[in-house]
Every structure is written in structure tokens, then in C-alpha cells.
Image: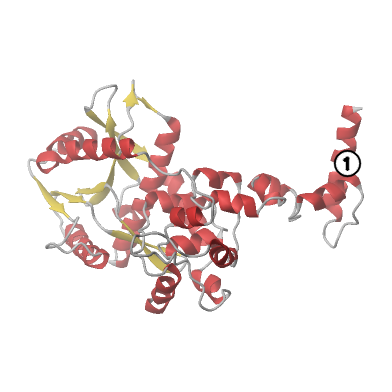
């Protein structure tokens, strides 16, 4: 693992790595066949900065206003030792606990390194799991990690892990409103998928300690503002479906050692910042480095990856640019021009293309008849 980390550090260059979070892992599993994103995320590359240097900047990510609103709501819920959150948990989970322990894991004795925080999180969760009483324990900002394609991605979740009655519950705090008992479906679905990442990471941690998966509940506590006020409300969200999809997609991601072994020696995404923090890496040189890694662009990437506009330009004329379902329906024909040639009968089908060529000719004939 150390040798792999060293290789990833050399590929990233001289800047500090960008940490994974539930959003990036969820986005990665949406397109597990993309080696480019898998490698860049694993190396902690700032994909937005790379895309900008390539001439394809993407307006991507949360607005600073949304981030500020989310931070303010989280601080409110966690104020005074998470007293407001504890009241919600008592109501939602039916707790009758007079006192609850509270551990802040955002740093350990002033040390905020990922490895130290993870070791402390592991120690405290192990101690809590071994206790046989019903004493509740809140863990604020635990450091988790998840094995992705052969390396450990560290997670810095905005959550609290709550243990009661021998089971842990993940608590996810979001600033989008629940109005009349209903939340925005897209935001709620994204929150469920991100929460499933945390549940899986906690299950892996406790599994290493000998505890079964059900030690971490599949019911996540989602805390959001209620109606148009800032008063928090809590809802239980079952993430079993998201966990199944997440585990299947993670198993499909190409292992990093296979990607790295196919790359030219000395490949790097270093932007060569000068003393004024301006990137000096020549765009054509950077383009060559990025293009050395296979990508798998689909229109869905535009809403989840900073490299999407570069990859879309690169994939112009390819069936992958039309979407995953269309690419799969075309049976591995990679070029739009080849598809048109097969449909019009101007190209002879290659080996294995006979069936898809017949379907394309039939579709072309039907279209012509409809338009005549």
C-alpha cells in the first residue's frame, strides 16, 4: 500500500492531496469504468484546476452560500454538546437515556492528520462496541476510510455516529428543508447515497474488529430544517438499496495498480505553480498526460465531474458521448460515423457487428419510410 501511495503522490505533484468525501465516492461509483477519474481522485488531484489549465473550466460544486448555510445549521444542531440533536434522537429512536457521552474527533490533541484521527476513531468505536450497557455515545466528525480499487480513501464526514443498545446509527445533517413532511426528491436521494458510503465505511471498520455488519444500522437519521424555519427535524432513511448498489459498483472499479502499470513512466498532473500560485504547466503537455489515461465519458458526468467538459470534447464523435444506455445498445460500436455507415449500408460489418448492423439498417429503413 505504501508503494502505491508513493506512486499516487508522484502523479499528483507538489500540492497537497484533496480528500475524498461521500459526494466524490458516490460520483465515482456512478461511472466505475472511468479509469481517469478513478486515478485522479485516488491521487487527490484538483480536477477543477487541471480542467481550467486545459482550457475547459467547469462551474462545479456547491455555492459558498449553500456551504455557509449548511455550516450554520450544523453548528446549531451540534451546539451545547449536541443537545438539540440528542432531543431529536430521543424522540425518533425512542431513547430513554438521561446522559450521553460526546467525543469530538475533528482533531486529536491538536493533531488533525488523517491517520491519527482514524486511529483515534477506530479506538473509540471499538471501545463503544464492546460495552454491554445502553449508554449512548456521540462521535462528532469521526475519520473513516474505505477501500476503493486497492487503496484507502479517507472520509471526513459531516456526521455524528450514535451508538445505543449495541448498534450504531449514522446521523447525516443537511441544510435542505423538509416542507410539510416532504423533501426535494433529488436532494434526499443524494443524501441517502452519501449516507450509505458512511455506513459501509463504518461497517468495514467494525468488521475488522470482528463485529457483524448489522452492528451499524441501515437506518440513517437524516436531520434537516423543518418547513421555512431553522428548527431541525429528524427522519429515518433506509439505505439498504443504496448499500447494495454501492458495493456492486465499488467491486467493478478497475484496480489502481492495473491502471498505473499501463501508464508511461514519469506521468504527472503537476501544474507547476510559481511563487504567485499561478499554474505554469503548458496545456499541451498536460493534455498529453491526461489523455494517457482511458476515460469513459457519459452525459451524466456533466453534473458530477470537473473534467467532464474536457472529456466530452475528447469523446466528440464517439458513441459514449451519447450516453451509457445508447453506447451499450450499440453493442460496442465506438464511432458515430461507423454507426451511420452501418445503418446506411455504406460500411461492411466487422467481426461481431453483423447483428447490430442488421438492426441499424432496419431502423434506418423505418426512419426513411416515416419521413417519406
Give the residue number, with chain letter if any, for mark 1: 362
Instruction: Give the quarter of the figure containing the N terminus.
Output: bottom left
Tell me if residue 32 comes above or below residue 12 in the rendering. above
Dot 1 crowding, Cα within 10 Å, few <14, some 14–19, many 20+ = some
- Residue at 27%, 38% (x, y): give it: 68
Q: Where is residue 70 in the image (x, y as percent from the top left)?
A: 28, 38
Taking the image as drawn, is residue 366 in sight? yes
Q: Position of residue 24 (x, y in %)?
A: 42, 52
Secondary element under disc 1, as helix, strand or loop, is: helix
Q: Position of residue 293 (x, y in %)?
A: 58, 65
Instruction: Give the quarter of the figure containing the C terminus.
Output: top right
Q: Which of 285 and 311 is in front in this view?
A: 285
Taking the image as drawn, is residue 248 in sight? no
Residue 272 falls in image quadrant: bottom left
Tell me if residue 135 comes above or below residue 212 in the rendering. above
- Residue at 18%, 60% (x, y): give it: 124
Amino acid at each position: 500500500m505504501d508503494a502505491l501511495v508513493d506512486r499516487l503522490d508522484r502523479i499528483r505533484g507538489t500540492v497537497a492531496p484533496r480528500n475524498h468525501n461521500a459526494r466524490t465516492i458516490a460520483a465515482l461509483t456512478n461511472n466505475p469504468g472511468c479509469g481517469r477519474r478513478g486515478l485522479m481522485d485516488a491521487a487527490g488531484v484538483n480536477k477543477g484546476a487541471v480542467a481550467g489549465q486545459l482550457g475547459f473550466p467547469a462551474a462545479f460544486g456547491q455555492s459558498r452560500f449553500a456551504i455557509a448555510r449548511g455550516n450554520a445549521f450544523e453548528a446549531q444542531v451540534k451546539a451545547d454538546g449536541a443537545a438539540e440533536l440528542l432531543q431529536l434522537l430521543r424522540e425518533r429512536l425512542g431513547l430513554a437515556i438521561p446522559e450521553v457521552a460526546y467525543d469530538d474527533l475533528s482533531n486529536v490533541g491538536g493533531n488533525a492528520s488523517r491517520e491519527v484521527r482514524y486511529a483515534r476513531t477506530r479506538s473509540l468505536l471499538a471501545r463503544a462496541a464492546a460495552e454491554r450497557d445502553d449508554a449512548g455515545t456521540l462521535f462528532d466528525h469521526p475519520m473513516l476510510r474505505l477501500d476503493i480499487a486497492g487503496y484507502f480513501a479517507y472520509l471526513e464526514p459531516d456526521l455524528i455516529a450514535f451508538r445505543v443498545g449495541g448498534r450504531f446509527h449514522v446521523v447525516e445533517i443537511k441544510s435542505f428543508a423538509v416542507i410539510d413532511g416532504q423533501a426535494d426528491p433529488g436532494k434526499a436521494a443524494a443524501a441517502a447515497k452519501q449516507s450509505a458510503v458512511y455506513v459501509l465505511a463504518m461497517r468495514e471498520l467494525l468488521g475488522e474488529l470482528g463485529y457483524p455488519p448489522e452492528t451499524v444500522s441501515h437506518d440513517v437519521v437524516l436531520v434537516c430544517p423543518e418547513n421555512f424555519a431553522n428548527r431541525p427535524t429528524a427522519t429515518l432513511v433506509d439505505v439498504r438499496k443504496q448499500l447494495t448498489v454501492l458495493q456492486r459498483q465499488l467491486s467493478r472499479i478497475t484496480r489502481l495498480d492495473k491502471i498505473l502499470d499501463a501508464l508511461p513512466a514519469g506521468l504527472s498532473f503537476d501544474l507547476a505553480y510559481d511563487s504567485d500560485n499561478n499554474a505554469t504547466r503548458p496545456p499541451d503537455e498536460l493534455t498529453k498526460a491526461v489523455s494517457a489515461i482511458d476515460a469513459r465519458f457519459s452525459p451524466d458526468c456533466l453534473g458530477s465531474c470537473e473534467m467532464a467538459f474536457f472529456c466530452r470534447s475528447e469523446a466528440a464523435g464517439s458513441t459514449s458521448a451519447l450516453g451509457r444506455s445508447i453506447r451499450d445498445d450499440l453493442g460496442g460500436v465506438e464511432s458515430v460515423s461507423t454507426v451511420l455507415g452501418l445503418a446506411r449500408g455504406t460500411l461492411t460489418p466487422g467481426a461481431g457487428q453483423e447483428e447490430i448492423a442488421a438492426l441499424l439498417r432496419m431502423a434506418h429503413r423505418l426512419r426513411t419510410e416515416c419521413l417519406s
